[in-house]
Structures are given as C-alpha cells and as structure tokens.
Amino acid sequence: MARLVEVATAGEIPVGGRKSTNIDDLEIAIFNVDDEQFYAVEDVCSHDSGPLGEGEIINTYEVECPRHGARFDIRTGKALCMPAFEPIEAYPVVCKDGKIYIEIDW
C-alpha cells in the first residue's frame, strides 16, 4: 500500500538544491531541478552504494555518483552509464500546501 511521507517544505530546497533524508531505513535524495520541480530517488548508487545526494547534477536530470562517476536519471532511476548498470528506485513527488511529500509503497 502506498503512503505519502512528508520530507521537506518547498522553501528548504532551493532551485538547484537537494536534501538527503532517511525514512524507515530508506536513504532518499530529493532534488529541486527547475522552478520547484522536485524529484526523489534512492540515495544509494547501485554500483557501490555511494551517496547520490552528494553527487553533481548534470544535464538537468542526471545525478553523478561522487565515487566512480555512474550517472542516473533522477526522473526514472535509470542507470545511464557505467560502472552502474542496475537502476535505482525513483519515488513520485507531491507538492501540496508548501510541503513536499514522496510516495512510498509499503
């Protein structure tokens, strides 16, 4: 069953910013890429568990793992280049009343 979990307020994450959080042992990174368009992905590289929330955003929708340079699409979680070939989890984001929620299946 899916549930919405509040992770931040819109003002906490400026355009170009990000926030890492932990929800029930899930490491999640939330990105604000453009005019308050938020995306949330698993904050763990599928190659070697690197912290994606510390990675550089490239081409608006790609995050690069700071350890070995694997890239992931923050909209879908798809692995875009080696050394990663397994995707990461991407979570739907809902903005309501100035708050940011992610949808998690439990």
Image: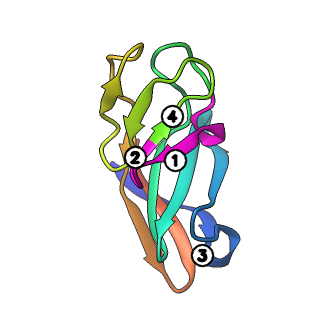
- How far across and down, in percent of the image, does residue 97 sit? 52, 86
- Highlighted magenta segment, given as a residue range: 51-62
Callout 2: helix, strand or loop? loop
Q: Residue furthest bottom?
A: 97
Tell me which amino acid carries mark 3: Ala
* Whole-number angstrom distance, CA of label 1 to CA of label 2: 9 Å
The image quadrant that residue 73 belongs to is: top left
Q: Residue at x 60, y 38 (%)?
A: 55
Q: Nearer the viewer, mark 4 or mark 3?
A: 4
* Whole-number angstrom distance, CA of label 4 to CA of label 1: 6 Å
Tell me which amino acid carries mark 2: Ile
Asked whether disc 4 touches disc 3, contact meaning CB atoms under 8 Å apart, the reply is: no
Residue where numbered disc 4 is placed: 64
Q: Label 3 neighbourhood size at 10 Å, few (<14), some (14-19), many (20+)?
A: some
* 78 left or right of 65 in image: left
Residue 74, disc: 2
- How far across and down, in percent of the image, does residue 74 sit? 40, 46
Asked whether disc 4 touches disc 1, contact meaning CB atoms under 8 Å apart, the reply is: yes
Q: Residue at x 47, y 51 (%)?
A: 40
Query: Could you say which is closer to the camera, residue 68 or residue 100?
Result: 68
